[in-house]
Amino acid sequence: MAVNLASVGPRRVDACPRVIPPVWVLPVLVFGLAGSTACERDLSEQECQQLLDRYVELLVQSRMPDASVEAVEEMQSEARERARSAPRFKECSEFFSRRDFECAVKRAKSVDEMERCLL
């Protein structure tokens, strides 16, 4: 029994078959992702303050591991005072997302980790 190879066509080089998702999958993914980020509320002024406080706390801990709680609070207070006059700080909610905030304030254990969260 002879097989006509001309009717089979060229053989695919890769062994994995190409999977083409149904047409409706892409719009569902796009609108689903857009919806999840569009519903995120902006950071409040208080949350921006928390970002600053956490950053100062981690910075002090890295540079002065024996610093007292009072020393950390004093430095946080000074940083807040400086931030009040910085126009860029007032735009904090435009620069950082809710995801950035959660990572930086709740999960970061060092200044480097926090900075990675905010990049």
Image (cartoon, grey):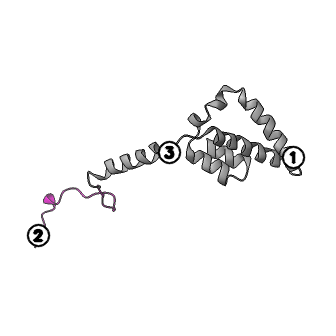
Q: Which residues are magenta?
A: 1-20
Cα distance, mark 1 to mark 3?
A: 35 Å
Say which element carries label 2: loop
Point out the tag, 1 or 2, that comes first from the N-terminus: 2
Residue beneath disc 3 = 40
Q: Amino acid at mark 3?
A: Glu
Q: Are marks 1 and 2 in contact (CB under 8 Å)?
A: no
Residue beneath disc 2 = 2
Q: Amino acid at mark 2?
A: Ala
Left or right relative to 16: residue 47: right
Query: How would you rate the neighbour count of disc 1 (Cα within 10 Å): few for under 14, some for 14-19, many for 20 or more?
Result: few
Say which element carries label 3: loop
Q: Are marks 2 and 3 in contact (CB under 8 Å)?
A: no
Q: Residue 72: horizontal and vertical position, in percent?
A: 83, 45
Q: Quadrant of the C terminus?
A: top right
Say which element carries label 1: helix
Q: Residue at x 62, y 42 (%)?
A: 118
Point out the tag, 1 or 3, that comes first from the N-terminus: 3
Cα distance, mark 1 to mark 2?
A: 90 Å
Residue beneath disc 1 = 70
Q: Residue at x 29, y 55 (%)?
A: 21
Q: Residue 102: horizontal and vertical position, in percent?
A: 61, 50
Q: Residue 52: horizontal and vertical position, in percent?
A: 71, 40
Left or right relative to 18: residue 88: right
